[in-house]
Image (cartoon, grey):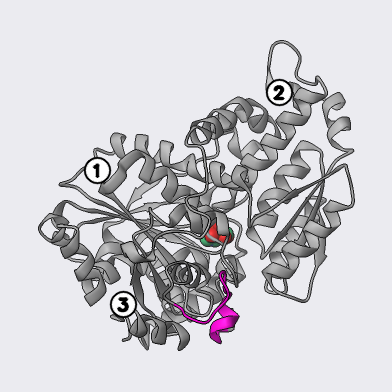
């Protein structure tokens, strides 16, 4: 298995030939061309407060959130059977799951960033147009007067599927016109689900970048249109980052310590980098050197890894922000949520001093872990969301991982470590679709 690729040339060779690898950020691979982008840490708490202000309205508009008072959050689940299924020894730490695959409304991690950005837009519009009144009861925005105002505005986005589901459905619930530009790899059931919610779905033949460009172009010409820009948006980033505040409370309630003696390893499936970048940003803000964030990407779509390596001058002869195509890769993967050719510059910049490393995963391994998770813990996730589960093995079992632990003085502390795999999507996957994932996963697991 090519998981031990070391620094420099070896990592680059594994990357180009689509072999799984673990890449570690070194001090040399720091310094984004534009420096650390200014993401104001205050935005994180502001995003959380915004979710709270809107909670009573969301409880009205989306009945599935009524039980949590309109707060869209996910549980933190212990996963001892999955730990065993992955072959992780007890003295290598415990395994938990941050279960974003069950998030309401969007059915994926995109609920965090996407819903936050639409709420922020709705809030500023409501303020500008005096729709909230003096009592600041956000349920007023569910009334006919506010909805009639919202209906004049169009919210547009480009997506491989899940961001579209998040933006499209929350926008439609609030009464906006919603328009989602989908790339060719978007799953038919995701398009059908959007249309059933009254969202206009526009299909494009190209990849994710083409869909984003089409959405951006369509909104630019219309003063009443608002475009959610997955490649550049600070509002999305802040919505994701707010997850860290809630996770801190969950860790405390579960009695899970995070400190020098009890390191926290977080494995985040990565597409353009906004979701994992925002979350890693929030976690580093709270836990500093005690949290170690690793991104996980498909072997055919390692855009964030390519971006990080290029930032650090590790890929000579390529443009400043290369795509996976520039390395001869195809961006072809069943992990549709991660099928992105070029990373977000905002996220790359924010991770330049915060990310521990990136590893890549084959589609076969994604399906095998999807099946393992279903069989061990009974959880149903989509292929993208399985990318976190090979993380502990990479960190604890590969040459690069062992080097990371040694360099950070962690070798003797692993029995007290917590590994956290972030399961990023799956709630609305149709049963027939999931059964196909499962049978593919079972045969991959049997013939690794
Ligand atoms: C979008 C998505 C991700 C990654 O988010 P990015 O912001 O694109 O990096 C991970 N998993 C799933 C299921 C997603 O839909």
Residue 244: name its quadrant: top left
Quadrant assignment for ligand 1:
bottom right
Percent of width and height locating residue 299 = 47, 79
Mark 3, secondary structure of its residue: loop
Q: Residues within 10 Å of mark 3 (few under 14, many from 20)?
A: some
Percent of width and height locating residue 272 = 57, 62
Q: Separation of disc 1 and disc 3 at Cα?
A: 29 Å
Disc 1: which residue? 258
Q: Earlier in the sequence, mark 2 or mark 3?
A: 3
Mark 2, secondary structure of its residue: helix
Judged from this view, the residue extending furthest toward the left is: 412
Residue 377: name its quadrant: bottom left
Q: Nearer the viewer, residue 278 or 41?
A: 41
Percent of width and height locating residue 256 = 24, 42
Disc 2: which residue? 139
Q: Which residues are magenta?
A: 315-329
Give above or below for 26 relative to 111. below
> In what quadrant of the picture does the N terminus appear?
bottom left
Judged from this view, the residue extending furthest toward the top is: 134
Q: Separation of disc 2 and disc 3 at Cα?
A: 54 Å
Q: Which residue is at 47% across, 59% downward? A: 32
Q: Earlier in the sequence, mark 2 or mark 1?
A: 2
Q: Earlier in the sequence, mark 1 or mark 3?
A: 3
Mark 1, secondary structure of its residue: loop
């Amino acid at each position: 298995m090519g998981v031990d690729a070391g620094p420099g040339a070896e990592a680059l060779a594994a990357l180009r030939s689509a072999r799984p690898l673990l890449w570690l950020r070194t001090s040399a691979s720091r310094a984004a061309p534009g420096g650390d982008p200014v993401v104001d840490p205050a935005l994180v708490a502001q995003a959380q407060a915004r979710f709270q202000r809107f909670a009573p309205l969301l409880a009205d508009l989306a009945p599935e959130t009524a039980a949590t008072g309109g707060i869209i959050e996910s549980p933190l689940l212990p996963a001892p059977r999955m730990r065993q299924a992955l072959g992780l020894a007890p003295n290598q730490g415990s395994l938990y799951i941050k279960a974003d695959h069950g998030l309401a409304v969007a059915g994926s991690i995109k609920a965090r960033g996407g819903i936050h950005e639409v709420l922020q837009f709705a809030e500023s519009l409501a303020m500008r147009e005096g729709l909230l009144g003096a009592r600041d009861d956000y349920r007023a925005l569910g009334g006919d007067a506010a909805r009639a105002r919202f209906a004049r505005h169009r919210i547009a986005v480009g997506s491989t599927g899940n961001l579209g589901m998040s933006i499209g459905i929350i926008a439609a619930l609030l009464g906006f016109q919603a328009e989602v530009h989908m790339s060719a790899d978007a799953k038919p059931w995701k398009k059908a689900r959007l249309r059933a919610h009254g969202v206009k779905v526009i299909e494009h033949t190209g990849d994710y970048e083409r869909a984003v460009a089409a959405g951006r172009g369509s909104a630019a010409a219309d003063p009443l249109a608002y475009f959610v820009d997955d490649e550049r948006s600070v509002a999305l980033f802040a919505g994701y980052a707010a997850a860290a505040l809630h996770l801190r409370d969950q860790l405390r309630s579960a009695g899970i310590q995070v400190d020098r003696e009890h390191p926290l390893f977080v494995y985040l499936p990565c597409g353009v980098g906004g979701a994992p970048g925002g979350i890693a940003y929030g976690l580093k803000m709270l836990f500093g050197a005690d949290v170690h964030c690793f991104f996980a990407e498909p072997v055919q779509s390692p855009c964030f890894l390519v971006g990080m390596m290029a930032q650090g001058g590790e890929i000579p002869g390529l443009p400043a922000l290369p795509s996976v195509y520039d390395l001869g890769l195809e961006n072809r993967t069943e992990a549709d949520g991660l099928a992105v050719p070029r990373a977000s510059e905002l996220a790359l910049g924010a991770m330049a001093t915060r990310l521990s490393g990136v590893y890549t995963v084959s589609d076969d391994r994604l399906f095998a872990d999807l099946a393992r998770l279903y069989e061990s813990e009974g959880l149903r996730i989509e292929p993208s969301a399985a990318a976190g589960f090979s993380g502990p093995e990479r960190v604890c079992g590969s040459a690069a991982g062992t080097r990371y632990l040694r360099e950070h003085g962690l070798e003797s502390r692993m029995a007290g470590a917590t590994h956290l795999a972030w399961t990023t999507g799956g709630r609305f996957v149709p049963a027939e679709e999931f059964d196909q994932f499962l049978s593919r996963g079972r045969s991959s697991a049997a013939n690794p």
